[in-house]
Amino acid sequence: DITVEVLTNLGFGSGPFTNVAPGSYGATYIVSDGCGNSSSCVIDITVVDDKKPTPYCKNGLTIEIMNSQPPMVEVWASDFDVASFDNCSNTLQYSFSPDTDSTSMVLTCDDIGQIPVQMWVTDEAGNQDYCETFLILQDNMGACSGPLVASVGGAVVNEEGYSVQDVMVTVNDSINDMVMTGPDGNFVFDSLMVGFDYTVTPAKDTNVVNGVTTFDLVLIRKHVLNEQMLDSPYKIIAADANNSASVTTADMVAIQKAILHEVDTFPSNKSWRFVDAAYQFPDPSNPWTEEFPEVYNINDLNGNMDSVNFLAIKIGDVNGSAAPNEFWNPVDERASETLVLRTTNQQLHPDDLTRIPVTSDNFEEIIGFQFTLRFDPAAMEIVDIEPGALPNLTQANFGFSLIDQGVVTASWNDSRPQYLPSDETLFTLVVRPLSSKPLEEVLAISSDYTVAEAYFESGDLLDVELEFAEGQGIESALSAVVAPNPFTAETTIGFFNPADQEVILRIFNTAGNLVYEQSRMAYKGYGQFSVGSSELSVAGTYIYQLITSDDAVSGKLVKTR
């Protein structure tokens, strides 16, 4: 008899074997006869799982969208499984497509309604099958009823209602959320998520002297002296140049330095400040009774806002003359008159320290002036500027930061209009000539830096010009200018000499008695005599006389104390 025996690691005998896991197995077959003879062979048996899993889907699934920002909900493929199974695998994967990584999906307001769904089931051998069902996405909480994003916008204007250009407006101080106002002053942020808090902040810190002139100092001086108060909280804030929550002479000093181009910023302040346009000052005469809002805060944005408006304040400008935008074209209120400053043309002589008195033939009812004095730095140096008869005029009224470029700036004002006769000296330039040139060729008034203008108390403007005696050219007659006059310790009697010749100075008292005489040989051009207390020890009025061989001039001289 022939006997066949099978040995495997699946079990004893030839099977059948159940619950065999996929894999490779070995089987040994042994054949024996009745005579004791036997033979064997070994074969490999491979068990594979090629049967798809059996998917079972829920018959639809209803889900509520979450009231988040933005509204959304995450759904998993396994949420749709009922009792899917496989013949071999205990662990199954669930996905929304054959891609086993698509295990979930995010639904938004765009998906509200019924959505067809495929639930794919994958076993450990990679066999796949799917069932079809559906999902109903609901919005019972109204999460999708409002906009997901909203716009926030407004306008920036000055107190007169003119649009302010080039204001940088940011949201939450983020450079990524920044817009610049155009000529219309408008700004808008059109993609802000609703439900969040925002802070809108305007800023502009350019051109510190835009609209800032000496007439602003006139008005601020009157405010400080309680003579004429600034009539709005915005003007009072504009006058507070040093941001001290008060208006004092220190602010006037800061503004004057800017006018003179000594500084290009205000101390502890910006060129422009902004106030929420809807804000009402509790006390308009004192804008610092409480902190005024310079930003606009939005809590829990829930829709479009188009009235986030700001009122812009140009620091230092209290009469509203700052240019707010590129199209601003104000009416020029200049009077027909021109304030004429006058000096005597003369031939400069190198290394001869020279005093140049400046007078005016029409300094009448003037309450302030400013200008740029240009000179040729290759032809002369300005060594000093001596104050004259103008009240409150000191060296602080002149700016010397650009003197190496041949520029001196000037700004003077007073609380009262001033009248000076033509023989009174406004100020005296002390110069050191570096070349032999006529003065009129190397000295002029311009608006290159500080705009040349003067002011009546009404605010009407005058042009300012510098003229030289005898028009264009060197004088042909003897002339004289006295500065200072009146004087206490010493004065200078300057003269123009039309030729190289002797010049005699005689001084008489009011009784006609000669009290002092001096003579000197003088070159053609400008010369001078100095007279002090040692020559005139008694206070009083004197008459001076300058005499040459063919000419004479005279004038009044006053000695005080």
Image (tube, helix red, strand yellow):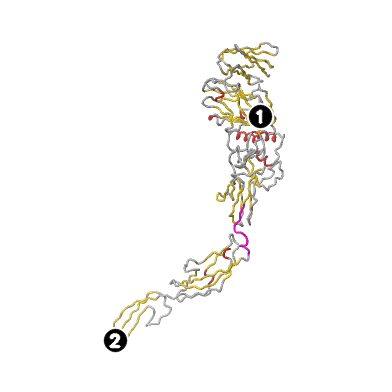
Residue 7, image x, y percentages: 35, 80
Q: Nearer the viewer, residue 503 or 266?
A: 503
Please say if 79 is above or below 404: below
Asked which quadrant contains residue 313, the reply is top right
Please say if 478 is above or below 371: above
Crowding around mark 1 (Cα neighbors within 10 Å: few <14, some 14 to 19, many 20+) is few
Q: Which mark is residue 337?
A: 1
- Which residue is the site of mark 2? 33
Asked which quadrant contains residue 26, the reply is bottom left
Let me know if residue 139 appears in the view.
yes
Residue 509, image x, y percentages: 68, 13
Q: Is residue 21 magenta?
A: no
At 54% across and 67% down in the image, what residue appears?
Answer: 75
Amino acid type shown at disc 2: Asp
Q: Is residue 145 magenta?
A: yes
Question: Judging from the image, what secondary structure is the residue with disc 2 in?
Answer: loop
Q: Nearer the viewer, residue 251 or 503?
A: 503
At 68% across and 48% down in the image, what residue appears?
Answer: 278
Q: Which mark is residue 462?
A: none
First of labels 2, 1 by sequence position:
2
Asked which quadrant contains residue 439, the reply is top right
Would you say 59 lies left or right of 307 here?
A: left
At 62% across and 44% down in the image, what residue appears?
Answer: 164
Please say if 117 is above or below 513: below
Which portion, as a residue range, is magenta?
Answer: 141-152
Count up the numbered dots: 2
Residue 328, image x, y percentages: 62, 41
Q: Nearer the viewer, residue 470 or 86?
A: 470
Q: Nearer the viewer, residue 273 or 522?
A: 522
Comparing marks 2 and 1, which lies closer to the viewer? 1
Crowding around mark 2 (Cα neighbors within 10 Å: few <14, some 14 to 19, many 20+) is few
Amino acid type shown at disc 1: Glu
